[in-house]
Amino acid sequence: MFPPEILKRFDLNGPRYTSYPTADRFTPEFRADAYAAALKTMQRRPASLYVHVPFCRSLCYYCACNKIVTKSASVADEYLDLLEKEIALVAEQSPALPIAQVAFGGGTPNFLSIPQLTRLMGLLGAAFDLRGDREQGIELDPRFLDEKYVKSLPGLGFNRVSFGVQDFDERVQTLIHRFQSFEQTAQAVQAARDCGINSISFDLVYGLPIQSRETFAATLERALSLEPDRLALFNYAHIPERFKAQRRIPTDTLPTIEQRTELFLYATERLVDAGYRSIGLDHFAKPNDPLAKAQDDGSLRRNFQGYSTHHSADLIGLGVSAISNLNGVFSQNSPQIDVYRERVTSGQLATIRGVALNADDHIRAAVIEQIMCAGQVDWADIEERFHIVAKTYFAKEQDALAQFADANIVTHTDQMLVVTPRGRLLLRAVAMVFDVYKNAKREQTITFSRIA
Ligand code: SF4
């Protein structure tokens, strides 16, 4: 086990590397015309779509997502009008682009009624070439679902659903202001299975108020009893100065860093014991799930939704705050609905910031993605893809890697960098060694020799 002060520092500083460069490196100098140019010249290979639905009916205090809490159903119609304009602007640059994967996230995508979802799928189908064998997923909030809703989803092309669970303990639910009975979740799962949706995922969160090993063990057992195909185990980041709703969570109810570490290790052990495979940083999947297979054959990818089995890196994000990643650029839409509205109604893409990757970014992104997906880096692969000599190119990183190796966090040779089972908890810290933007800051603040 690592000293708590080291875990704490890594825990606070380590990005989840759903992108490299990380989103905090995006700048306002990257403008909509650069995104338009990237769309226009992108390859005609199957891409992914992400649609952000920002509305929620109730505020969860722990939430750090981009959302608008409202009870008004009519806001969704106006939002669809705006999405229609954005979809047309994107398709104007890259007409009938083939799409192999569609994901709806939020917010709460099931804030949209079935007629609204039908309209949205019609807009996507008219603008893009949605492949018949596409993977199509949606995040669902079981508190606001009925059987009829779930059973309408396959007819709209959905074959994957992800349920936000977080924690089944009622005392925890009271403190985070998210009241969701086990029965609600169980009924939603049953409805999905009844209509042939066989890819079901749960999101759980550890580090929430008053969680203990006992309470979280009970949550895990209840989750396991529903036999999800995948689970994601997210670490709650308490940043009340940034996320106002989190101020309603009393700090003294939060587990300590040691307790959170124990929760994560316990959950990992229990899930592996229950037959799930550990995927990357914080995901678990049944051995026959495509995520586990992709990890085995090296095709697992990291993206803004976590992990993906989709080979193409091209991602088009639609809606407020959505991020696109294609043709060597990241482009983020405005997170403010007023700005988003003003942009798309005046015929402009909604980009407010982003970045165009340079040659070094591409190399480091590939290394970091291998660490986050496979827990290892195959240097021969990197050398072949980028025509570099890895040891020379990453000469400055060798000291930090040697210190990680001394601490038994990694093993490192000229052929492979491998994160050890003990080092898995520090996967983000290992990836950070290759983050040229974070690296300078980290060298000033962290002494790796303190790792015991
Ligand atoms: S956690 Fe989900 S449902 Fe709750 S406020 Fe955030 S986005 Fe909405």
Image (cartoon, rainbow, N blue to C red):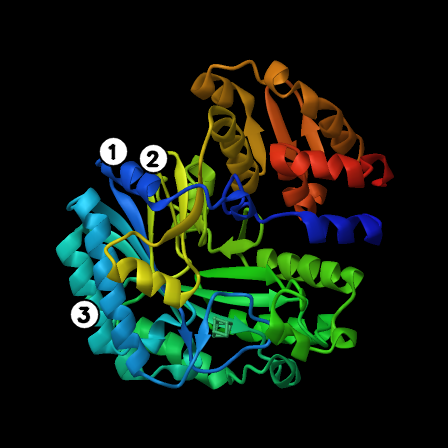
> Is 71 on the left-hand or right-hand side of 225?
left
Compared with residue 165, is residue 9 higher up or lower down, i.e. above or below?
Answer: above
Question: Which residue in the protein does label 1 denote?
Answer: 41
Of 343 and 394, which appears nearest the observer?
Answer: 343
For the point 20% across and 64% down, the residue is 121
- Among the two numbered marks 2 and 1 on one chain, the one whose residue lies closer to the N terminus: 1
Residue positioned 51% across, 82% down in the render: 182
Query: What is the secondary structure assignment of the residue under circle 1?
Result: loop
**What secondary structure is marked by label 3?**
helix
Tell me if mark 2 has few (under 14), some (14-19) or many (20+) residues whose alpha carbon lies within 10 angstroms of its own.
Answer: some
Q: Are marks 2 and 1 in contact (CB under 8 Å)?
A: yes
**Label 3 lies in ligand 1 vicinity (Cβ under 8 Å):** no
Residue 161 in sight? no
Residue in view at x 84 percent, y 49 percent: 3
Position of 9 compared to 154: left or right? right
3D distance between C-alphas at marks 3 and 2: 29 Å
The residue under label 3 is which amino acid type? Arg
- Position of residue 448 relative to residue 391, above or below, is below
Going by the image, does 444 lie left or right of 160? right
Question: Which residue is painted at 51% across and 83% down in the image?
Answer: 180
Amino acid at pointer 2: Asn
Disc 2 target residue: 327
Q: Is residue 331 visible?
A: yes
Q: Amino acid at mark 1?
A: Thr
Circle 1 Cα neighbour tier, 10 Å, few/some/many (<14 / 14–19 / ≥20): few
Q: Does the beta carbon at disc 1 come under 8 Å from ligand 1? A: no
Nearer to the camera, 107 or 302 = 107
Label 2 CB, ligand 1: below 8 Å?
Answer: no
Q: Which residue is mark 3?
A: 119
Residue 357 or residue 187, whichever sits in front: 357
- Residue nearest the observer in this picture, 413 or 128: 128
Q: Locate the C terminus and report the quarter of the image it occupies.
A: top right
